[in-house]
Image (spheres, coloured by chain):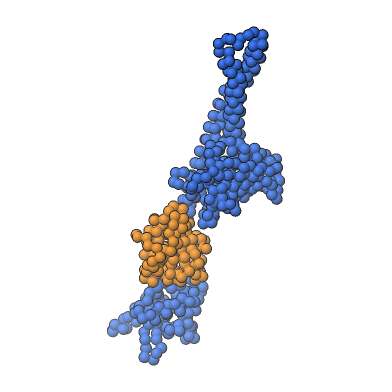
Amino acid sequence: MELVLHEEIEYNGLFLNIEEFTDIKVLVHLKGRLETANSIHFLKFIIDLVDFSSVGCELILNMKELYYVSSTGIGAFTTILVNCKKKNMNLFMKDMQPKVKDILELLGFISFFKLI
Amino acid sequence: MGININFKRFVEKSNSMFYVTSLKGEILYINDFGKSLLGITPDDINSGINVQSFYLFSEDRADFIQDLQKGEIIQEHEIRLINSYGKKIIGHEQSYIVPRSSGVDLVYGSVNDISDFIELNLNTARLNLELADINQKLQDAYTSMAQQEKMATIGELAAGVAHEINNPLGFIISNTNSVGRYIKILTEIFTKIKKTYNINAVEGIDQLEFILTDLGEVLKENKDGLRRIATITDSLKRFSRMGDENNKSNFDLNQAIKDTLTIAKTQYKYIADIELNLGDIPPVFCNGDSINQVLLNLIVNAAHAIDSLDPKERGLISIQTSVKDADVVFQVTDSGSGISDSIKNKIFDPFFTTKEVGKGTGLGLSLCYDIIVQKHGGKIWVENSSQGGAIFSFTLPGGNYGK
């Protein structure tokens, strides 16, 4: 994986943009829909990013423009969280849309994630 | 029998929901499985029930229709429904729009109920998360225990070394005092001889006079050195006195700070000065060994913060104690570069360290947190001073002395 900052990458309606990458903070902007058609690409993108990141740093997913998350998307989030924990990284979800929050609550996952 | 009739039978008997609705959502056709899944009756259909009422999130329908109208033939996505009995359903939906000459377009679609499949997958994900949490706690606990074990061993070792040093130190001090007395006697005798006899011509008499004078000075320096060794061994003994974690007693925090400064001197003496402002505080009812460990960690941390400055400059470590609202307050301020906001909330987390690999375990502050907060019901926090360095503070509950 080649790390490119400030360049939007699209996976079937999901747009990802690495806005910041330092030893203590990695910030990724998510836009569009996270669903079956792109969850696996999203997961690979973020897991590669976690591998590149420094131990103990923060991974922040800016979800201000993420309007839809399917169950496969939630599965991807949980896998990312497990990988972050293995590297002692903190995962934060920033500015989550109420609708996305509702589905995380509905499926009983909200308590696992740190919302900011 | 034509294909249409067979296909209609397949749709009727299918274990997927098949439906036809208007763009506005009025249900025009739904197969038996669909009726059962959504919990609707023929009367509901006759009364013009709208599919919108089964969407768990009402805006999902509008988003979906918008996607359909983008022109792609078939749209598939995950749909979240709630049926008439309140059961939540997650389905996989495939739909398309059939344009009609009347202008009233229809939506044809099918939905597979994948709730059980999703639940199973998400349960696995949930278990993975819980397992990761448990693993992390286990690892933290193991490392913390290993660290405490190490500290206990070092403490025992230090106590043993202090004891071994103390025995010879006792007779060295005693003998040195005797030598001092002998020199005094020798000097008095020499003075009398010098007054009584003319010995100025004796070869080397000047040197003897100098030796007697200088011996006093040398002995004074020796005594000073021995006093410092005694202070260190006393501090080591006090610091490393082993005991049960629950073994609490009245503890002189100010004396403990002085002892810790003696022990940690090599860590700061070349890089920082110490400013002590120890208030008139009551004894604290606590486990002294644990609090000694906290003091050592915080003072060594302050020294490391100053040592990490680039360019290097001699710094200042200020320590103060006071009483506030019946609590005893300890505060150590360094002249380092402070703590950035982004790490303040995790600085007491186990394994968190900003030091180079191999220089810090990331456990020091988490142990401090455990000792102050968990074991003693106190508080510990960090903030930045107006001069830019860090201030680590802790409080220990007062008002229960001797209990």
- Residue at figure coordinates x 55%, y 35% from the top left: B155
B53 left or right of B384 in image = left
Viewer-closest of B149 and B19: B149
Q: Residue furthest front?
A: B201
Question: Image point 53% across, 37% down: which residue?
Answer: B266
In the picture, which chain is orange? A
Q: Nearer the viewer, residue B98 or B382?
A: B382
* Occupied quadrant, residue A1: bottom left
What residue is at 51 percent from the left and 57 percent from the top? B342
| The furthest residue to the top | B197
Percent x, y for residue A72?
Answer: 41, 66
In the rendered image, the quadrant that contains the N terminus of chain B is bottom left
Confirm whether residue B76 shows in the render: yes
In the rendering, at what x and y percent does residue B27 appear? 44, 83
Q: Residue at x 56, y 26 (%)?
A: B165
Where is residue B124, by image quadrant?
bottom left
Above or below — where is B265 with respect to A37? above
Asked whether, in this view, residue B369 is left or right of residue B329, the answer is left
What colour denotes chain B?
A: blue
Quarter of the view holding residue A50: bottom left
Specify whether residue B128 is in view.
no
